[in-house]
Image (cartoon, coloured by chain):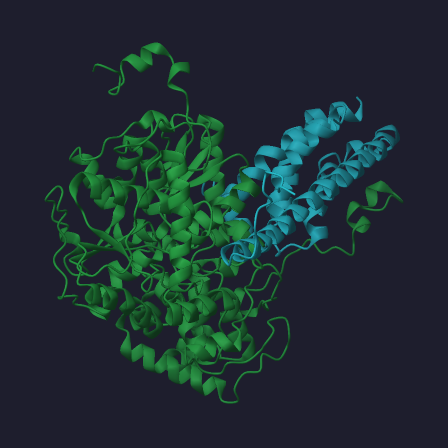
Amino acid sequence: MTEFKGLPTSDEYFSKIDFKPPKTGWMDTPTVIRDGMYCFPAKPKSVKTLDLPFPREWVPSDDDWKLPENWKEIILEGMKDRLERFRTFKVFMDICVRCGACADKCHFFIGTGDPKNMPVVRAELLRSVYRNDFTKAGKILGKIAGARELTVDVLKEWWYYFFQCSECRRCSVFCPYGIDMAEITIMGRELLNLVGLNIEWIGAPVAFCYKTGNHMGIQPHAFKDMMDFFTDEIEEVTGVRVEPQFNKKGADILFITPSGDIFGDPGTYTTMGYMLLHHYLKVKYGLDITWSTYASEGGNFGLFTSNEVMKRLNAKMYAEAKRLGVKWILGGECGHMWRVVNQYMATMNGPADFLEEPVNPITGTKFENAKDTKMVHIVEFTADLIKHGKLDLDPSRNDNLKVTFHDSCNPARGMGMFDEPRYIIKKVCKHFYDMPRNCIREQTFCCGSGSGLNASEDMELRLAGGLPRANAVKYVQEKHGVNMLSCICAIDRAVFPPLMEYWVPEVDVTGIHELVCNALIIPGEKEKTVNLRGEDIPNKDEMDPDEYFTRPDFPGR
Amino acid sequence: MSLNNLLERNKDDIVKQWLVSVIDTYPADTSKFIKNQKDPFANPVGNTLSVNLGPLFDELLNEMDYKAITSYLDPILRVRAVQPILSSSQSIGFIFLLKKAIRRSLKKELSDKNILKELLHFESKIDELTLIAFDVYLKCREQIYEIKSNEVRNRTFRAFERAGLLTEISAEEPSL
């Protein structure tokens, strides 16, 4: 800029800072492994427990990942084997026309701004190697046909980006061919596992679940201790002593939920909600529900490891149902547990023909959608009870809450559950506000921490990936004064509090069954002044008398 | 005409140029998306930038109010603080791109010495803005580390608690 004559240009002030991003295409832009974006590698102990190959200590920021000598052969063999075994994998490798419809639909791309997080590029990471080694065009034309050789750098890129996908499948909704990106990530992770490239946040829970029955490695007596603690808490608030049953043979129903809700707030309040509901159904209708201290985990991080590991962990729930001789299984508010049950169970460990086709004994409703798996989602179960007028509810107890609902990815996109949760919320709360249409239901944005990425060391990834979701919450907070984000997934409940703290302070997080049990009028309860969290329940006397008069619980009505 | 008047008159052009150059700090595929996607929920990063850069420019034209400036900078830097694709200097340095936008937009007018003198003064305001940005950015980064450490601490605390290794201090004095 010569017109300034002697004045340095503004560029010269910061000549050492390069504002220009690389102009190269994705294939020629080297991947930089950045702190805050990855989870720590799995410890040898976890890998060994599961009999997975090549347990070792390795560090992502090191050059040498201590790969086995024949790593390339193992990966390519593994790919060949999977292309033959999984028709979906083969089809998804072949049919993408790179139209780009998926490109800007990924929360990780939107939040991080990293083009390699575009679903199409993430898939190309794998597809380029597929073309190179398994297609004629790729073998002959090489790079022109979008092929590239598998090198150590490519492998590292796989590890970095396949653990930056939460398998939420939002991109798949927009793909004209219906390519399931989650399945590509699943395959990518399976292949990485063949050479011992895993993450501890998945490795440890899977190993614990395999050995002890839940992600946390909590043994049966400790599990029961925790439930006893909840029982006391519930009594203090409601005056009602609930009596949860454990490992009861011959019970009607086995209840299984993610252990995260038993050991982490605010999920613990959802667990107390389940306990109160079970108690209510027992007292009112004689329904006999049991927990299991062995199948004490609904979550299945095996889904994030390999098909075989997923199958092993899923089998436990059914083995326990068989051992106890229950009629069917009731599942709690969980995300990927439902993906596994609804999409894979029937052909993986099914048919569960030793169980009965689920029927709600109180309403007579047949859950035909659970005919194969014999496992019913508690949200469907509770919605059914409310629909038939089987629960006494006082929604005014939730009057302090302005609630929005996050469609947890797996129940939403994995089983099409959109209306039941909203139905329940509207029956137990008076103030409900949905987020904008392109952020909910089948288009819901992921929490940013699913598929085993909810560690702490990758917080930047989680906060960036959660930005689109948080952004929509912020909108309803500003527009309607929303102060409570409800969801039906234990991982959501664990990861939303920090996400809200960063992006939308003053918004709290809850499960739906906590809301249900705030409103549930339990036989023999004392005058409740606080809810399960110890917060004051809105005082009826302070309410607008006109509004009070029109309410169904107005005395004499 | 004073520089301030010129800046006010050319505000739309300058802010637009500034916005485009900030978006271009992202890789080509990303910046194309950020520029083209107008839905605020599908493109929170672009929306945050386009909503806040204008008011920031207004603050520079007027009495720079620290609180107001912080409120416009915070959403932008909150995003950039969680994007390791940008270095710290790149995260904050987007402010300097305003200098470039102004110089480009007022190329002709800046041949006037008086205006050039005023520009030097105005640019030091931009430098001041950058220092405020440093405060805001660092606060975001500190919050991220705080969230990280709180998560780890809470987890450990809960583990001890569950294992029965902790007891609460009783409210009642023990009888001696």
- Looking at this rendering, what residue extends furthest in the left direction? A364
Q: Image height check: is A224 above or below A55?
A: above
Q: Position of residue A99 (x, y in %)?
A: 38, 57
Q: Image height check: is A396 above or below A243?
A: above
Q: Name the image quarter holding residue A255.
A: bottom left
What residue lies at 49% left-to-right and 89% top-to-bottom? A70
What residue lies at 52% left-to-right and 78% top-to-bottom? A44
Residue A97 visible in the picture: no
Q: Position of residue A185 (x, y in %)?
A: 40, 66
A399 and A16: which is toward the camera:
A399
Q: Colour of chain B?
A: cyan
Q: Name the image quarter holding residue A354.
A: bottom left
Q: A354 left or right of B57?
A: left
Residue B128 visible in the picture: yes
Q: Colour of chain A?
A: green
Q: Position of residue B77 (x, y in %)?
A: 64, 43
A396 and A199: which is toward the camera:
A396
Q: Image height check: is A15 above or below B14?
A: below
